[in-house]
Image (tube, rainbow, N blue to C red):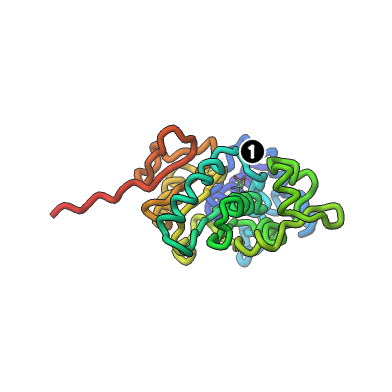
Amino acid sequence: MSGVAFDTIAALVRARAGIVLGADKAYMLDTRLGPLLREKGLADLEALAARLRLPGAEALAAAVTEALTTNESFFFRDGKPFEHLRRALPRLAAARGPGGRLRVLSAACSTGQEAYSIAMVAEQLGLLQRLEVIGTDLSQEVVRRAREGIYSQFEVQRGLPVQMLVKHFRQEAGQWRISQALRSAVRFEAGNLLADLRHLGSFDVVFCRNVLIYFDAPTKTRVLSALADRLAPDGVLYLGGAETVLGLSDRFMIVEGERGVYAPAPKLALAG
Ligand SMILES: C[S@@+](CC[C@H](N)C(=O)[O-])C[C@H]1O[C@@H](n2cnc3c(N)ncnc32)[C@H](O)[C@@H]1O
C-alpha cells in the first residue's frame, strides 16, 4: 500500500472517530478493509483512497471508519469495576430516594456485553426496575448486535458466570438470547463520543472503557470533559485497565484503592 493511501485513510478515521492509526497498524488495513474492497469492486487500498477523496463519499467514509474499529468485548470484563458497581449502585439508589431512576451510560458499548453485565448486577441487587442503561457506539453493526442480544457459545463462555447464563439467557438455534427482563432495562443507539452528548441526559454512572486507548491526548481530554458534563456530582466513572484521567483531565479524582474508578472533582466555588 502506498503511503498516500495510508495517510488518506488514517486522516479520515482520525477526523471521524478520533482513532489514531500508527504506521505500525498499516498491516491491519488490508485485512480489515478487504471485505469492503470486494463489496465495492475496488481493486486495492489506493483505489479506495482515491474514491474517498471524491465528493459524495460520506457513506463509504462511514463504512471505512466502522471497519477500522476494534470491537472486542466480553461479559464482566476485568471483574473489578462490576464489584465496585455492586457497592456503588445501592449508595446511589439510596441517594436518589425511593423509586428514583438510576441512569448508566455504557459508552463505546460494542456488542452490548458491558451494558447487560451492568443490568445483571442491578438485578442481583433488586434494582433492575429502577435501572436505565444506555449503550452507545460509533459502529452501527455492533449496535444492531447489542440490540438483538444474541450471543454465541464462545461469547457466553468469556466472563459470564454459569449461574448468570442459566438465569438470564435461553438457548436458541445454538446461540444464547438474553432475557426480555434485562433487555427492557437497556437501550442502544449509534453515537460518536466526539459528537455532542447532551441529548443523552445526565447519568449516575458512566462506563467508558477500552476506547480512550485509541485516541490522542487532546481527544481523550475532550471526551473526558464531555463525560464529566454528563455525570452526577456523586456519580462514578469507570475506565479500562490501560486508561487513566491522570495528566488529561482535572474533572475527575481517583477513587483511592480502586483501579479504573473515578469520581467527579468537586466544582470550585467562583471567587468574588
Ligand atoms: C474495544 S471496544 C470496547 C467495548 C467495551 N467498552 C469494553 O470495554 O468491553 C471499543 C469500541 O469503541 C467504539 N468506538 C471507537 N471510536 C468511537 C467513537 N469515536 N465514538 C463511539 N464509539 C467509538 C468501537 O466501535 C468499539 O466498539
Q: Is residue 37 visible?
A: no
Queried on whether the Cβ of the residue with tag 1 lies below 8 angstroms from ligand 1, the answer reads no
User: In the depicted view, which residue is nearer to us: 226 or 3?
Assistant: 226
Extreme-left residue of the structure: 272
Q: Which residue sits at x=25%, y=49%? A: 268
Extreme-right residue of the structure: 173
Which quarter of the rendered picture does the N terminus lie within? Answer: top right
**Residue 217 placed where, x, y %?**
45, 42
Please give the residue where the numbered disc 1 appears in the rendered image. Answer: 25
Q: Amino acid at mark 1?
A: Lys
User: In the depicted view, which residue is nearer to us: 67 or 189?
Assistant: 189
**Residue 146 placed where, x, y %?**
68, 57
Q: Is residue 153 above or below residue 132?
A: above
**Residue 46 placed where, x, y %?**
69, 49
Which element carries disc 1, helix, strand or loop? helix
User: In the depicted view, which residue is nearer to us: 97 or 138?
Assistant: 97
**Residue 259 placed where, x, y %?**
49, 35
Residue 200 placement, left or right of 153: left
Which quarter of the rendered picture does the C terminus lie within? Answer: bottom left
